[in-house]
Image: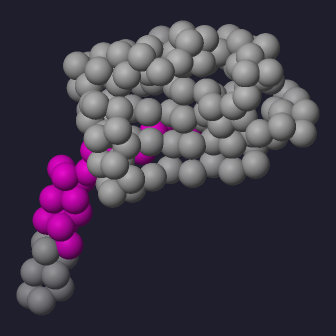
Amino acid sequence: MTRRVAAAGTLAAVALLGACASPDTEPPPAPVMPAHWRVVEDVTFGEAERVRVSSRLGGRVAALRNTTYDVGGRRLKLNTIVADMPADAGQIESTFREHKSGEWFARRGRVLWEFVGDEEMLDEVRAGRARLPRD
């Protein structure tokens, strides 16, 4: 009898966790970039950091990844942002447009990618943008 109660309790807990977990809290993996780009660091962020970034970008961030690459001895970062809702993605895109050239970011639905690096790396950014998922 105890085993059944414990098993039932475990199943209920698993079901509850499954219902509460959102696949959007994990950002998609970093896109495959040109062969000479070497990943130095790949970090996903928790709720506290997502709230801070949401406040700065003006739209709610559901998932966030920062991938740092070594590109010919220079650092180039790629932020992968999953917005909570399409309207949030639109607001984040508007914030990007206010602060940087459209070549430094891209949006596909609720996912946005932001490149961060020196202006001299624009050709590399263009090569990276060409590797982003199309849909």
Is 66 colored magenta in this rendering? no
Please identify the quarter of the rendering in which residue 90 is found: top left
Give the quarter of the image for residue 89.
Answer: top left
The residue lying at 74 percent from left, 16 percent from top is 122
Residue 24 within the magenta-colored segment of the rendering:
yes
Front residue of this view, candidates 24 and 77? 77
In this view, the residue farthest toward the bottom is 2
Query: Is 65 placed left or right of 31 in the picture?
Result: left
- Asked if one can make out residue 88 in the rendered structure from this viewpoint, the answer is yes
Measured as percent of width and height from the top left, residue 78 is found at 61, 33
- Viewer-proximal residue among 62 and 123: 123
Residue in the picture at 69% in, 31% down: 117
| Res 27 quadrant in image | top left
Position of residue 48 measured from the top left corner of the image (x, y, whole percent):
33, 57
Point out residue 58 in the picture as x, y percentages from the top left corner.
28, 31
Indicate left or right for 20 with 96 as reference: left
Q: Nearer the viewer, residue 5 or 39?
A: 39
Compared to residue 41, the image places residue 96 above or below, namely above
For the magenta stretch, what is the residue range? Answer: 10-29
Number of numbered markers: 0
Is 109 positioned to the left or the right of 128 in the image? left
Q: Horizontal and vertical percent for residue 125?
A: 71, 19
117 left or right of 27 in image: right
Query: Magenta: predominant secondary structure element?
Result: helix
Q: Front-most of 39 and 28?
A: 39
Q: Compared to 59, does 66 lie above or below? A: below
Is residue 24 visible from the viewing direction of this image?
no
- Up the image or down, 9 lies above or below 119; here it is below
Quadrant the N terminus occupies: bottom left
